[in-house]
Image: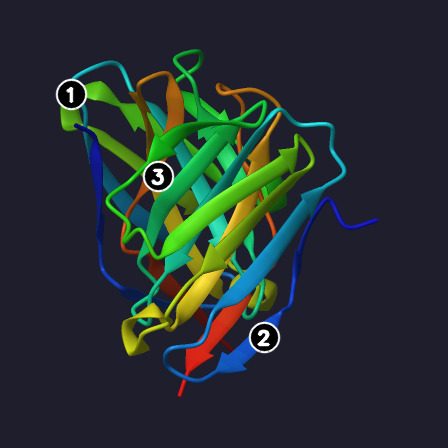
Amino acid sequence: AQSVTQLGSHVSVSEGALVLLRCNYSSSVPPYLFWYVQYPNQGLQLLLKYTSAATLVKGINGFEAEFKKSETSFHLTKPSAHMSDAAEYFCAVRGFTGGGNKLTFGTGTQLKVEL
Amino acid sequence: DTAVSQTPKYLVTQMGNDKSIKCEQNLGHDTMYWYKQDSKKFLKIMFSYNNKELIINETVPNRFSPKSPDKAHLNLHINSLELGDSAVYFCASSQTLNQPQHFGDGTRLSIL
Protein backbone atom coordinates (compact mmCIF):
# COMPACT_ATOMS: atom_id res chain seq x y z
CA ALA A 1 0.00 0.00 0.00
CA GLN A 2 1.11 3.55 -0.66
CA SER A 3 0.87 6.53 1.65
CA VAL A 4 2.18 10.07 2.01
CA THR A 5 2.83 12.16 5.10
CA GLN A 6 2.87 15.93 4.97
CA LEU A 7 4.72 17.50 7.87
CA GLY A 8 3.11 20.68 9.07
CA SER A 9 -0.55 21.33 8.48
CA HIS A 10 0.13 25.08 8.41
CA VAL A 11 3.16 26.92 7.04
CA SER A 12 3.56 30.67 7.14
CA VAL A 13 6.18 32.60 5.15
CA SER A 14 6.85 36.21 4.30
CA GLU A 15 6.38 37.43 0.76
CA GLY A 16 9.65 36.91 -1.10
CA ALA A 17 10.87 34.18 1.25
CA LEU A 18 11.59 30.56 0.39
CA VAL A 19 8.65 28.18 0.44
CA LEU A 20 9.32 24.62 1.63
CA LEU A 21 6.46 22.15 2.00
CA ARG A 22 7.43 18.68 3.16
CA CYS A 23 6.17 15.36 1.89
CA ASN A 24 7.43 11.87 2.70
CA TYR A 25 6.10 8.82 0.97
CA SER A 26 5.82 5.13 1.60
CA SER A 27 5.53 2.77 -1.34
CA SER A 28 6.28 -0.88 -2.00
CA VAL A 29 6.91 -0.14 -5.68
CA PRO A 30 8.62 2.79 -7.42
CA PRO A 31 6.16 5.60 -6.79
CA TYR A 32 4.58 8.19 -9.00
CA LEU A 33 4.27 11.36 -6.92
CA PHE A 34 2.26 14.52 -7.38
CA TRP A 35 1.72 17.91 -5.84
CA TYR A 36 -1.66 19.55 -6.19
CA VAL A 37 -2.80 23.03 -5.11
CA GLN A 38 -6.30 23.94 -3.98
CA TYR A 39 -7.43 27.55 -3.87
CA PRO A 40 -10.48 28.43 -1.74
CA ASN A 41 -13.72 26.99 -3.08
CA GLN A 42 -11.98 25.43 -6.05
CA GLY A 43 -10.90 21.99 -7.15
CA LEU A 44 -7.37 20.68 -7.15
CA GLN A 45 -4.90 21.81 -9.78
CA LEU A 46 -1.85 19.78 -10.69
CA LEU A 47 1.39 21.61 -9.84
CA LEU A 48 3.88 18.97 -10.88
CA LYS A 49 4.47 15.24 -11.08
CA TYR A 50 7.32 12.77 -10.72
CA THR A 51 7.10 9.69 -12.90
CA SER A 52 10.58 8.14 -12.56
CA ALA A 53 12.35 10.39 -15.02
CA ALA A 54 14.39 13.39 -13.75
CA THR A 55 14.51 13.60 -9.96
CA LEU A 56 14.16 17.39 -9.98
CA VAL A 57 10.75 18.24 -11.34
CA LYS A 58 9.68 21.72 -12.35
CA GLY A 59 6.04 22.68 -12.22
CA ILE A 60 3.81 25.64 -12.76
CA ASN A 61 3.96 28.98 -10.93
CA GLY A 62 7.69 28.62 -10.20
CA PHE A 63 7.35 25.54 -7.98
CA GLU A 64 9.65 22.56 -8.11
CA ALA A 65 10.12 19.34 -6.18
CA GLU A 66 12.99 16.92 -5.79
CA PHE A 67 12.52 13.17 -5.51
CA LYS A 68 14.98 11.69 -3.00
CA LYS A 69 14.72 7.95 -2.79
CA SER A 70 17.20 7.66 0.09
CA GLU A 71 15.04 9.98 2.19
CA THR A 72 11.69 8.83 0.72
CA SER A 73 10.88 12.49 0.27
CA PHE A 74 9.31 14.71 -2.36
CA HIS A 75 9.43 18.20 -0.86
CA LEU A 76 7.93 21.15 -2.72
CA THR A 77 9.87 24.41 -2.95
CA LYS A 78 9.62 27.86 -4.44
CA PRO A 79 12.48 30.37 -4.13
CA SER A 80 10.31 33.43 -3.57
CA ALA A 81 6.76 33.33 -2.20
CA HIS A 82 4.04 35.49 -3.66
CA MET A 83 0.77 36.47 -2.05
CA SER A 84 -1.07 34.52 -4.73
CA ASP A 85 0.61 31.30 -3.53
CA ALA A 86 -1.58 31.22 -0.42
CA ALA A 87 -3.57 28.02 -0.75
CA GLU A 88 -3.81 24.41 0.42
CA TYR A 89 -1.18 22.06 -1.00
CA PHE A 90 -1.58 18.31 -1.27
CA CYS A 91 1.06 15.70 -1.91
CA ALA A 92 -0.21 12.47 -3.47
CA VAL A 93 1.16 9.08 -4.44
CA ARG A 94 -0.28 6.90 -7.13
CA GLY A 95 -0.90 3.28 -6.47
CA PHE A 96 -2.40 0.59 -8.61
CA THR A 97 -5.37 -1.40 -7.53
CA GLY A 98 -6.74 -3.85 -10.01
CA GLY A 99 -5.47 -1.70 -12.83
CA GLY A 100 -6.96 1.48 -11.44
CA ASN A 101 -5.22 4.81 -11.02
CA LYS A 102 -5.76 5.43 -7.34
CA LEU A 103 -4.33 8.61 -5.85
CA THR A 104 -3.66 8.58 -2.12
CA PHE A 105 -3.44 12.10 -0.73
CA GLY A 106 -1.66 13.54 2.25
CA THR A 107 -3.57 15.59 4.78
CA GLY A 108 -2.61 18.85 3.15
CA THR A 109 -0.55 21.90 4.14
CA GLN A 110 -2.13 25.33 4.35
CA LEU A 111 0.36 27.93 3.08
CA LYS A 112 -0.05 31.47 4.37
CA VAL A 113 1.97 34.30 2.81
CA GLU A 114 2.39 37.45 4.84
CA LEU A 115 3.52 40.91 3.81
CA ASP B 1 -14.69 26.23 -21.32
CA THR B 2 -14.83 24.26 -18.09
CA ALA B 3 -12.95 20.98 -18.44
CA VAL B 4 -14.57 19.08 -15.57
CA SER B 5 -17.88 20.51 -14.45
CA GLN B 6 -20.01 19.44 -11.53
CA THR B 7 -23.57 20.38 -10.68
CA PRO B 8 -24.78 21.57 -8.36
CA LYS B 9 -22.00 23.57 -6.72
CA TYR B 10 -23.88 23.67 -3.43
CA LEU B 11 -26.44 21.20 -2.14
CA VAL B 12 -28.28 21.66 1.13
CA THR B 13 -30.78 18.99 2.07
CA GLN B 14 -32.27 17.09 4.97
CA MET B 15 -31.31 13.77 6.46
CA GLY B 16 -33.01 10.84 4.79
CA ASN B 17 -33.35 12.48 1.38
CA ASP B 18 -31.96 11.09 -1.88
CA LYS B 19 -29.81 13.35 -4.05
CA SER B 20 -27.63 13.22 -7.14
CA ILE B 21 -24.51 15.07 -8.20
CA LYS B 22 -23.65 15.24 -11.87
CA CYS B 23 -20.22 15.40 -13.46
CA GLU B 24 -19.25 16.00 -17.06
CA GLN B 25 -15.85 16.30 -18.68
CA ASN B 26 -15.22 17.71 -22.14
CA LEU B 27 -11.59 16.60 -22.32
CA GLY B 28 -12.21 13.33 -24.13
CA HIS B 29 -10.80 11.41 -21.18
CA ASP B 30 -11.41 7.70 -20.65
CA THR B 31 -11.26 7.61 -16.85
CA MET B 32 -13.37 9.43 -14.27
CA TYR B 33 -13.32 9.51 -10.46
CA TRP B 34 -15.26 10.60 -7.40
CA TYR B 35 -13.45 11.84 -4.30
CA LYS B 36 -14.77 12.92 -0.91
CA GLN B 37 -13.10 15.75 1.03
CA ASP B 38 -14.10 15.95 4.68
CA SER B 39 -14.17 18.96 6.98
CA LYS B 40 -10.46 18.51 7.75
CA LYS B 41 -9.67 18.70 4.04
CA PHE B 42 -8.76 15.00 3.87
CA LEU B 43 -9.32 13.67 0.36
CA LYS B 44 -10.23 10.06 -0.28
CA ILE B 45 -11.15 8.30 -3.49
CA MET B 46 -14.58 6.71 -3.65
CA PHE B 47 -15.00 5.35 -7.18
CA SER B 48 -13.27 5.22 -10.52
CA TYR B 49 -14.63 4.34 -13.95
CA ASN B 50 -12.63 3.56 -17.06
CA ASN B 51 -14.55 3.52 -20.32
CA LYS B 52 -17.79 3.27 -18.35
CA GLU B 53 -16.55 0.27 -16.40
CA LEU B 54 -16.17 0.42 -12.61
CA ILE B 55 -12.54 -0.23 -11.67
CA ILE B 56 -12.19 1.23 -8.18
CA ASN B 57 -14.81 0.87 -5.50
CA GLU B 58 -13.43 1.83 -2.12
CA THR B 59 -15.12 1.04 1.15
CA VAL B 60 -18.11 3.26 0.61
CA PRO B 61 -21.63 2.64 1.96
CA ASN B 62 -23.87 1.12 -0.67
CA ARG B 63 -26.11 4.17 -0.29
CA PHE B 64 -23.64 5.71 -2.75
CA SER B 65 -24.12 4.54 -6.31
CA PRO B 66 -22.13 5.90 -9.25
CA LYS B 67 -23.51 5.77 -12.74
CA SER B 68 -21.64 6.37 -15.97
CA PRO B 69 -24.02 6.70 -18.93
CA ASP B 70 -21.10 7.44 -21.25
CA LYS B 71 -17.38 8.20 -21.03
CA ALA B 72 -17.97 11.92 -20.55
CA HIS B 73 -20.30 11.59 -17.57
CA LEU B 74 -20.05 10.11 -14.10
CA ASN B 75 -22.93 10.85 -11.77
CA LEU B 76 -23.14 10.10 -8.07
CA HIS B 77 -26.44 9.18 -6.46
CA ILE B 78 -26.78 9.09 -2.69
CA ASN B 79 -29.71 7.45 -0.93
CA SER B 80 -30.91 8.11 2.61
CA LEU B 81 -28.48 10.93 3.30
CA GLU B 82 -26.84 11.01 6.73
CA LEU B 83 -25.17 13.80 8.68
CA GLY B 84 -21.78 12.21 8.06
CA ASP B 85 -22.23 12.60 4.33
CA SER B 86 -21.65 16.34 4.67
CA ALA B 87 -18.47 17.02 2.71
CA VAL B 88 -17.17 18.39 -0.56
CA TYR B 89 -17.38 15.86 -3.37
CA PHE B 90 -14.92 16.19 -6.24
CA CYS B 91 -15.17 14.68 -9.66
CA ALA B 92 -11.97 14.16 -11.65
CA SER B 93 -10.91 12.71 -14.97
CA SER B 94 -7.73 11.51 -16.63
CA GLN B 95 -6.93 10.73 -20.25
CA THR B 96 -6.07 7.16 -19.40
CA LEU B 97 -5.47 5.20 -16.23
CA ASN B 98 -1.87 6.41 -16.11
CA GLN B 99 -2.28 10.13 -16.75
CA PRO B 100 -2.65 12.95 -14.18
CA GLN B 101 -6.13 13.72 -12.96
CA HIS B 102 -8.03 16.93 -13.62
CA PHE B 103 -10.47 18.01 -10.94
CA GLY B 104 -13.79 19.80 -10.98
CA ASP B 105 -14.54 22.63 -8.56
CA GLY B 106 -16.44 20.39 -6.16
CA THR B 107 -19.96 20.06 -4.81
CA ARG B 108 -20.42 21.17 -1.23
CA LEU B 109 -23.05 18.91 0.34
CA SER B 110 -24.58 19.99 3.65
CA ILE B 111 -27.00 17.76 5.52
CA LEU B 112 -29.34 19.44 7.96
Q: Residue at x 35, y 39 (%)?
A: A92
The chain containing the residue under callout 2 comes to: B
Distance between mark 1 and mark 3 Cα atoms: 18 Å
Label ID, residue A70: 1
**Front: mark 2 or 1:** 2
Distance between mark 2 and mark 1 Cα atoms: 44 Å
Distance between mark 2 and mark 3 Cα atoms: 26 Å
- Bin the neighbour count of mark 3 within 10 Å (Cα to Cα): few under 14, some 14-19, many 20 and up: many
Q: Amino acid at mark 1?
A: Ser
Q: Residue at x 45, y 65 (%)?
A: B88
Q: Identify the secondary structure beneath mark 1.
A: helix
Q: Are marks 2 and 1 on the same chain?
A: no
Which quadrant would residue B47 be assigned to in this image?
A: top left
Are discs 2 and 1 less than 8 Å apart at CB? no
Label ID, residue A92: 3
Q: Badge 2 is on which residue?
A: B10
Q: Identify the secondary structure beneath mark 3.
A: strand
Q: Amino acid at mark 3?
A: Ala
Residue B48 in sight in this render? yes
